[in-house]
Image: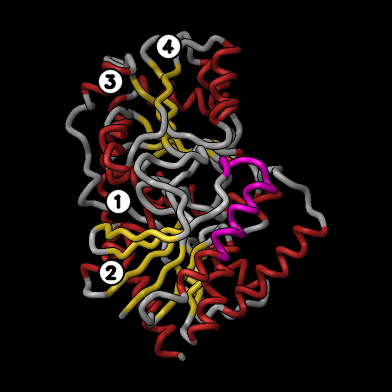
Amino acid sequence: MHILFLTDNFPPEGNAPATRTYEHAREWVKLGHAVTVITCAPNFPEGVLFPGYKNKWYQREVIDGIDVVRVKTYITVNEGFAKRILDYISFGITGAIAGLFQKRPDVIASTSPQFFCACGGWVLSVLRWKPWIFELRDIWPASITAVGAMETNTFIKLLEKLELFLYRRADRIVSVTNSFKTELVERGIDGSKIDVVVNGVDLSQYQPATEKDQALSAQYNLQGKFVVAYIGTHGMAHALDKVLDAAAMLEDEKDICFLFAGGGAARAELEASIARRGLSNIALIPRQPKEMMPALWSLCDISLISLRDTPLFEQVIPSKIFESMGMGLPMIISCPEGEATGIIRETKSGVVVRPEAPEELARSVRELYLDRERLAELARASGDSAELFDRARQAKLMIDSFKEARAQV
């Protein structure tokens, strides 16, 4: 089977959409399928081209057997609604055009939350008379209003109409959470065409570390520290200001250090706030290439997952949960009660605290710092749970969805 997949993000970018698509595509190639990924020049999240890449109209490369086609787009930093919309629309257009010139596919897939990418996939499926699979990674545009980036207005309502149109037109929908499927069914979408394939972890790359990476520990003055780490995109959704509040409450514990690693729209404000408050128990590491992630995760004693207190985030499952499991790390999750907190509770891999509650977060960190036996129990449960979310298994589930879409046409 030849799979043509449209996605805004792909390695060397290391965010969740890029990682999911790459690891699935690599597994599909191993299973004997041909995979063509249409994407843009890597620039997320800073809106700056990665070294060695140019924003050209058309360029090709092969990554682990995946045929990767990169197209020209409007590039901007991951902040500011209007500019990001231009970014998304430009890829939807150039990605669809590039798809017309690829070897005839058997199925066409495209991924959200940037659903202009989904639009491109649908248009391409119409023009090439092939089934289209909509991979639903986020309920968009609801997530725009949920983080306060924009209030509901006429434009948002038009986007919601487009959203429902795409759900109805998709031959199949692959949702990353059960909650998304439930919401779509409640909105009138046929549940029989919706499959759920949650995120996962590449267990060939992520394994519990026997020791912390000494070079990184020395570089960022983390030797002998008990490290509570937030690793990933620093965005408006993540309530990192509340994490700083918790860190301020723990400055008296000289061995405890909060680590922030990554980049994104909220990174500059985070750094400014740390400097303004004079916090001494913070370490900052810039975004790292994907191959550095296991070494970066090895620095952690606790993996921190944080989301704002808004109902939409009851439905999401942050992908860092699964990488934490792959590394055998205990977690503290500060999110609305929902699928993500349910996974943590069911696997007994971490501690759940209320979202945007810095006092509770600080107390949980202090308790685990003092109770190393409890910490070790959580770590063991986390590592034991990783096999439930093996990326190879998830990739096969998605192939089943592709085959179903192909059989229905």
- Outermost residue toward the right? 154
Q: Give the left or right position of residue 98, taking residue 373 as reference.
A: right
Where is residue 247? Give x, y as percent: 50, 19
Q: Give the left or right position of residue 190, taking residue 299 as reference.
A: right
Q: Nearer the viewer, residue 55 or 153?
A: 55
Give the mark, 3 or 2, whose residue is nearer the N terminus: 2
Q: Amino acid at mark 1?
A: Ser
Residue ID at (40%, 77%)? 401
Where is residue 333? Give x, y as percent: 47, 39
Q: Amino acid at mark 4?
A: Glu
Q: Say few, some or many: other residues with alpha carbon within 10 Å of mark 4 (under 14 / 14 to 19 / 20 or more).
A: few
Considering the numbered disc 1 on the image, is that residue within a helix, a strand or a loop? helix
- Outermost residue toward the left? 210
* Bounds of the magenta segment: 76-93
The part of the image, by quadrant, that contains residue 222 is: top left
**Label 2 belongs to which residue?**
28
Q: Are marks 1 and 4 in contact (CB under 8 Å)?
A: no
Q: What whole-number distance in Å separates the C-alpha atoms at marks 2 and 1? A: 24 Å
**Label 3 belongs to which residue?**
217
Q: What whole-number distance in Å separates the C-alpha atoms at marks 1 and 3? A: 27 Å
Disc on res. 349: none
Q: What whole-number distance in Å separates the C-alpha atoms at marks 4 and 2? A: 48 Å
**Label 1 belongs to which residue?**
385
**Label 4 belongs to which residue?**
253
Residue ID at (47%, 48%)? 318
